[in-house]
Image (cartoon, helix red, strand yellow):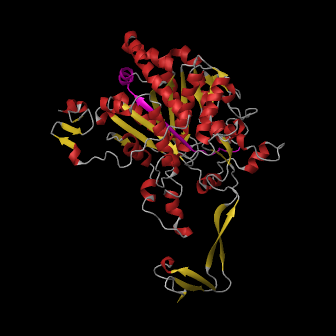
Amino acid sequence: MLFDALPETEQQRTLQALAALQGQRERSELLDGSLVRQLDRELFDPDQVPINVTTHSDGHLDLDVRNMDLPTPVPESWQITPVDERRSRVRVPAGAELFMAAGQRSRVQSAGRLPEGFRPGELYPSRNHPRALQLAVYGASDTLGMLGMDWDRVRNRLRPDQIAVYASNATGQVDDAGLGGLFRYPATGRRITSKQVPLGLGEMTADFINAYVLGSTGATGAALGACATFLYNLSLGVQDIRSGRRRAVLVGTSEAPLVPEIIEGYRAMGALAEDEALLKLDPHRATPDHRRACRPFGPNCGFTMAESSQFTLLMDDELALELGADILGAVPDVFVHADGPKKSISAPGIGNYLTVGRATALARQLLGDEGLRRHTAVHAHGTGTPQNRVTESGILNEIARAFGIRDWPLSAIKCFVGHSLGSAGGDQLAAALGGFALSRLPGITTVDAFAEDVHTERLSLSNQHRERDDLQASLLNSKGFGGNNATALVLAPHTTRTLMERKHGASVLRDWARRSETTRTAMHDYDEQALRGEAKPVYHFGEGVLDADHLTLTDQGIRIEGHDQALDFGDDDLLTDYL
C-alpha cells in the first residue's frame, strides 16, 4: 500500500516478498499482480460465469442417461428404454422445462485478490480444503512464524484454559469445496460430498487452527458480525484477557468470497462497483480503471469485494514482558453496539455513533485531551459506496466536534485492498500497526477529489500518504449489515510501552527489552526464510492425537500428556459472594 513512499531498500524487500509468493516476475508484474485489480481466470472466468437458461421443449426429446443418474422415483411422464447395462434412453414429453448451460460476462470485473499466482493450498496437504480454510492455515502459521519464539514455549507457560482461539468469517466457506458446492452441486448434476457441510461452517476457521496449527485444547469460539466480524472476535479476546480468564488469545478471520454467486448477490443489492458505473466516473476513459475501483469518500459507485486472511496474537502484559515478545501495540478495548430500530436491515443506524464515541472517550482517558486531539487518527470503514461516504463521515465529524477535535486524520485502506467483509477490521489493524512502524498514514490514493457531500468540517482527508511519527493511537471503525457496529482503539508501540512502564516500572521494561532482542532475531530469521520462499504453513494432520489414555484425572484437575501446566478446577472467585 505504501510502496511509493518507502525508501529504496524497503521497496526492494517488498518486491522480494511479493516474488516469494508470486514467483520470479518483473517489478511491474509483481506490483500489478497485487491489491485491487481486474478479475482473471485464476479463480473463475469473469467473462463466462456459468448460468442456466430456462426454456421449454416444443416436441419430445430423447436423451441417453447413465442409470446411476436417474432420479428415484422416475417422473411418470418419462418413458425409459434400456440402452445397455449402464445407460437408458429417456423420452421427455413436449413442454418439459429445460435448463441450458451457458455463460455470461460479470458486470463486476474488479476485486481485491491474493497476490497473482499465490496458491496457499499447494504449500501443505490441503485435501480439498475450501479456499478460506487454506487462507486460515497460512495466515495463522505466518503469525506463529513472526512470533519469534516456538509456540510450545507459550503453551507450556500456561494452563490449557488460559489460551483461546477466536476466529471465523462472515460468509462461511462458499466455494465448491464448502457450502457453495453443497448448494450448487445437485442443480448442476454433481454429487454432494461428505466434507462440504462440516468444512463450510463459519467457525471452522477456529476449529482448523486449534486442531492442525496450534494443537490447542483451550477455549474456542467464532463471532460473526458481517463486516465487523474481525473486531467482534478481537473484542472476545480483549475481554477475556482483561477479565483474567485468558492470557494468550489468537484472533483472526479468513474470508474468501470471490465466487460468482456471492459477487452477483451483492451486485443485485446495488452494493458493488460495476464496470458500467466506473466508466461514468471516468468519462474520459475507454475502459474501466479496475485499479481505482474503490474510491472511499470520493465520487464513487460501490464497494470492491476482496479476500483476506488476518491473524494477531494477544497477550496480557505480564506474559508479553516475561516472554520478551515483540510488542507491536495494544488494544485496550473494542466497543460493539447494535443500531436499534431500523427501516431496513442494510440501512445505517445510530449504533456506530455509540461505538466511535466510546472509543474516542477511552483514547482521551488514556492519552489526555492533547493526545486525543493532536496524536490520533481513524482507519475508517470507508467502503467506497455513496451512502457510506455520507453516513460514516457524518458520524466521525460529529464525534470530532463533540470532543473538540479539529482536522482528525482519516485513512481508508479499502482503496488498496478492497472490502474483505469479515476480515476488513483485520486489514485495518494490520494497516494501523504497519503505519505506526513506518510513521506513515496511508492516503486515499484512488480519489482525485473528495465528494462534496462528505462531512469534512472536523476531518482531514488526503489522497497522499502522510508522514506521522507522532501518532499515539488509531481508531478502527467497522459498520456491517444488520446493525453490526464495532470500533477498536489501538495504541502505538511507544504509547504501549509508556503505559506498561507506569504499571510495571522501568527496570521491568529494561529486562523485557533485553529479552526481546532474541525474539526479534528469531523473527528476522523467519522473515528471511519467508523471503526465500522456504516458509511453509504449519499443518499437523493426524499428529499427536489425544484420547483418554493421555489424561490424568483427579477431583482437583486434569493433566494432559505433553502439557507442562495442568488444568486446575479451582474455585470460581466470582461466586464467592454467593457462598
The picture places residue 78, in percent across and down from the top left corner, at: 55, 86
- Is 218 above or below relative to 400? below
Residue at x-position 67% and y-position 42%: 33
Residue at x-position 52% and y-position 28%: 357
Snapshot quadrant of residue 198: bottom left
The picture places residue 508, in percent across and down from the top left corner, at: 37, 13
Q: Is residue 299 magenta?
A: no
In the image: residue 7, left or right of residue 128: right
Q: Is residue 315 magenta?
A: yes
Q: Quadrant of the C terminus?
A: top left
Snapshot quadrant of residue 227: top right
Residue at x-position 49% and y-position 31%: 526
The picture places residue 509, in percent across and down from the top left corner, at: 40, 14
Q: Nearer the viewer, residue 478 or 246?
A: 246
Q: Nearer the viewer, residue 533 or 515?
A: 533
Name of the residue lying farthest toward the left? 555
Q: In this rendering, does residue 358 appear at all?
A: no
Q: In this rendering, does residue 109 appear at all?
A: yes
Start and end of the magenta stretch? 300-323
- Is 500 above or below relative to 525? above
Name of the residue lying farthest toward the right? 284
- Is 401 above or below relative to 270? above
